Image (cartoon, rainbow, N blue to C red):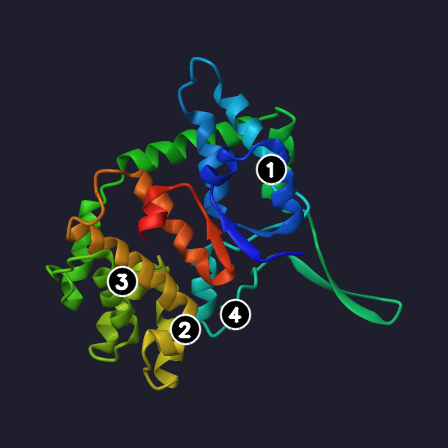
Amino acid sequence: MGPVTLFDKSFLQQLSEDESVWFDHFFQACVSPIFYVETLADLAKAARKDRAPDDEVAIISHKFPEMHGTPCVFHLELAFQNLLGQPIPLTGQIPVRGGRPVKHAGRNGIVFNSLDENEAFARWGEGHFEEVERGFAYRWRQAVASLDLRSAIDLLRPVGLAGLRCKSVEAARDAAHAFVSATENPFERMRLAAHILSIEPQYRREMVRRWQIAGRPSLMTYAPYAAHVVSVELFFLLAMDNGLLSPDRPSNRNDIAYLHYIPFCMMMVSADRLHRRC
């Protein structure tokens, strides 16, 4: 089995069905939850002149790596667990949920049941689309279309990052990495991290308590994967604030989210220009 590979919807769309079989055979595919979201959202798009949304989704599902495709756990769930002390390997391994330990013939193992996402893809490949999935697709597209990315830049002000001049995406990346690696103003940094990671207020006290017991280290030292997610989000905000990425394209939000899964692969393939640049 080949290298663990993160891919997006644009990559599968460029493959022929024969090429998708070779991809599935020679690579271990890391399936980001964002891929499912993007594909599901196609169900709510206006029909093309030559192809209905259902047909478009069915074509993508036919190219899905069924044998060696492994769905990854949602990044916010992983970051939350990391902040509560659960180690998250950043070595190209794919975190999978739903496993249960078993023992057979004196040997230990783990069994993973079929996930809802895989079952949905099987239905889509046969042209069966549940109404609940259509409704979710519509609500997701509406949420993305109405998202005001400019207002998110206000999050940078409490920690002194608002107005920081970055002349390149590399500079924005370095500033984001510096934030999660620093120890100054520790409580303000943890407060911003909790906000970015959508940590519910009732869990923030426990998160801070564990962090204080550990000696208030930098976020990168305390919870490396949570730090990665925060750095990606800060990079995105800084790049928008400096005009390096457009805040007027809600689709950028989906594209950037793929970068949260970089630690769980050995390579990433995409036809998206934003991915190539970032």
Closer to the chain start, of discs 2 and 4, is 4
C-alpha gap between disc 4 and disc 3: 22 Å
Q: Is label 4 in a helix, a strand or a loop?
A: loop
Q: Amino acid at mark 2?
A: Ala
* Residue 146 makes an appearance in the image: yes
Task: Describe residue 265's horizontal placement relative to residue 249 as left or right.
Answer: right
Task: Describe residue 107's horizontal placement relative to residue 41 as left or right.
Answer: right
Closer to the chain start, of discs 4 and 1, is 1
Q: Amino acid at mark 3?
A: Arg
The residue beneath circle 2 is: 223
Residue 200 at x, y = what percent? 37, 59
C-alpha gap between disc 3 and disc 2: 19 Å
What residue lies at 31% left-to-right and 63% top-to-bottom?
Answer: 231
**Mark 3 residue crowding within 10 angstroms, few (<14) / some (14–19) / many (20+):** some
Give residue 89's mark: 4
Residue 25 at x, y = what percent? 67, 47
* Residue 130 makes an appearance in the image: no
Mark nearer the viewer, 4 or 3: 3
**Front-most of residues 43 and 245:** 245
Q: Amino acid at mark 4?
A: Pro
Closer to the chain start, of discs 2 and 1, is 1
The residue beneath circle 3 is: 173
The residue beneath circle 1 is: 19
Q: Is label 2 in a helix, a strand or a loop?
A: loop
C-alpha gap between disc 4 and disc 1: 31 Å
Mark nearer the viewer, 3 or 2: 3
